[in-house]
């Protein structure tokens, strides 16, 4: 008698048997601590590079402002990261209300001021030239924000949860 191929065997199984086998073999798709550790390494590397730039390559008179922009971007990123990764349905409900208020603020006030920021970026010494100092502020703020959002999302999504005691 010829051996059955694996596709013939799986076709012979009922759909519920195949589904139960898949569920039995299913691994935790959330990830684990290694994801959080990798995210932490990236965060430390990115923020370290920003600090290195701030203290080594930037103008001494602007270092305090660059640190402030970086700290503000990191803090805002941390808050946004928390808002997009709630732990429970109750927290999700509370955070969605806060997110609606923040979205209203962002679409109203911040977007109206964005035009002035873009104008300032292109207000260099020669008309239409890029203002490199303004670019420094934007890059440091946006990079710190992105690194913090990413790490907060990873740590809240992939950190193993404690079992209830």
Image (cartoon, rainbow, N blue to C red):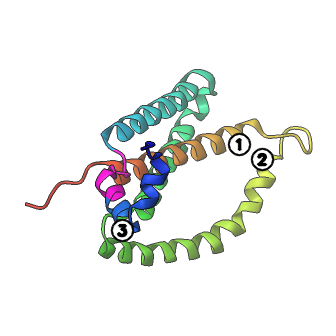
Asked whether 163 or 99 is in front, the reply is 163
Q: Position of residue 33 (x, y in %)?
A: 31, 40
Snapshot quadrant of residue 2: top left
Where residue 153 appears, as percent x and y from the top left, is 43, 52
Mark 3 vs mark 1: which is more N-terminal?
3
Q: Which residue corresponds to the image point at 45% horizontal and 63% vertical from the top-left?
A: 84
Q: Which mark is residue 121?
A: 2
Q: What span is colored magenta in the figure?
A: 21-31
Rate crowding at label 1 as few (under 14), some (14 to 19) or many (20 or more) other CA atoms within 10 Å: some
Q: Residue at x 42, y 38 (%)?
A: 39
Q: Which mark is residue 16?
A: 3
Please name whichever residue, 44 or 109, is drawn nearer the observer in this view of the structure: 44
At a point 55% along the width and 33% down the height, the residue shown is 63
Left or right? Give the position of 8 relative to 128. left
Asked if the residue at tag 2 contacts the one at tag 1, i.e. Cβ–Cβ closer than 8 Å, the answer is yes
Q: Position of residue 139 (x, y in %)?
A: 64, 41
Determine the secondary structure under disc 1: helix
Q: Mark 1 highlights which residue? A: 134
User: Residue 5: x, y in percent?
Assistant: 47, 45
């Amino acid at each position: 008698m010829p051996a059955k191929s694996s596709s013939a065997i799986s076709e012979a199984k009922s759909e519920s048997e195949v589904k139960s086998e898949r569920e039995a073999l299913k691994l935790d798709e959330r990830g684990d601590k290694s994801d959080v550790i990798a995210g932490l390494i990236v965060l430390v590397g990115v923020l370290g590079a920003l600090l290195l730039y701030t203290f080594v390559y930037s103008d001494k008179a602007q270092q305090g402002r660059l640190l402030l922009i970086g700290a503000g971007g990191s803090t805002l990123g941390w808050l946004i990261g928390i808002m997009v990764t709630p732990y429970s349905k109750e927290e999700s409900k509370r955070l969605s209300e806060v997110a609606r208020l923040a979205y209203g603020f962002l679409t109203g006030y911040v977007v109206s001021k964005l035009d002035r920021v873009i104008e300032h970026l292109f207000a260099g010494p020669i008309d239409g030239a890029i203002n490199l100092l303004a670019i420094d502020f934007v890059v440091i703020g946006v990079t710190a924000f992105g690194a913090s959002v990413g790490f907060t999302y990873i740590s809240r999504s992939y950190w193993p949860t404690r079992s209830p005691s």
